[in-house]
Amino acid sequence: MPGLRVSGIYTDSLQALQSVSSTENIDILFMDIDMPSLSGLELASVLRAKTRKLIFTTAHSRYAFEAYEVAGDAFLLKPYSFAKFSTTINRLFAGMEQSAQAVQERDDYFLVKSKADDLAIIRIRYDEVIAFESAQNYIRIHLSGQRILTAYLTLKDILQLTAGRFEFKQFHRAFIISTWNISQIRGNTVHMINNLSFSVGDLYKKQFTAYLEEKLLTTSRK
């Protein structure tokens, strides 16, 4: 389903407890109820504060009341259809995508001091940006029209700037790119529309794979 990215799958409740407890808060936690060691209900009572939404999935309708007792947000009775799954997700997160898009539309530019222009403050629209490139103590901002602007910034500054803007991704330690401006991907190499290219770094392969899984159109033929 577009917009969802799986960050972990566990068949052992104790392993799930250890892993989820040590991570940052997550958006959705899907929880079966019949599990060894700790039941899903017991596990949910411990991990509820770590997730924004808690969805129970089980083949037993008798657990419905207990699921809501531990602040479950939804209950999917197996077997359930993709339509049911999709409806549940959209209901729980109604309006979030539209709100995020509205924020991006209102806040469509940023200002930087240009090193080459005597630190003049330059207005840049997000949709002009092809990539941010780390270059020693500076950031090169690759823009449409083959323009490059250099600013005294760090990649950490850029990560903060682009947080919440879904088109910007980091697949290499020196680049944060606008995925809107990818021209092609060949194997492990990403080519941008301005002829900039780079190989996906080992530390970023998980994020890169998740991006491909979300965006790559594949056939349903068997």
Image (cartoon, rainbow, N blue to C red):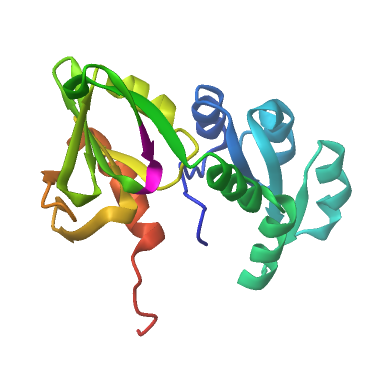
Q: Is residue 6 magenta?
A: no
Which one is nearer the viewer's eye here, 186 or 95?
Answer: 95
Can residue 160 be seen by looking at this rendering? Answer: yes
Which one is nearer the viewer's eye here, 4 or 85?
Answer: 4
Name the spot of residue 24 as percent of width and height, x first: 52, 26
Name the spot of residue 209 as percent of width and height, x first: 30, 51
Residue shown at the point (68%, 36%) measured from the top left: 52
Q: Give the quadrant of residue 88.
A: bottom right
Question: Would you say 167 lies left or right of 97 here?
Answer: left
- Say if 54 sits above or below 190 in the image: above
Can residue 153 be seen by looking at this rendering? Answer: no
- Say if 117 sits above or below 30 in the image: above
Name the spot of residue 177 as percent of width and height, x first: 28, 42
Which region is colored magenta? 123-127
Name the spot of residue 187 as percent of width and height, x first: 13, 57
Q: In which quarter of the image is the C terminus?
A: bottom left
Q: How many labels does the image show?
A: 0
Residue shown at the point (34%, 74%) measured from the top left: 218
Residue shown at the point (87%, 38%) measured from the top left: 69
Q: Does the magenta stretch include residue 124?
A: yes
Which SS type dominates the magenta stretch?
strand
Which one is nearer the viewer's eye here, 203 or 134?
Answer: 134
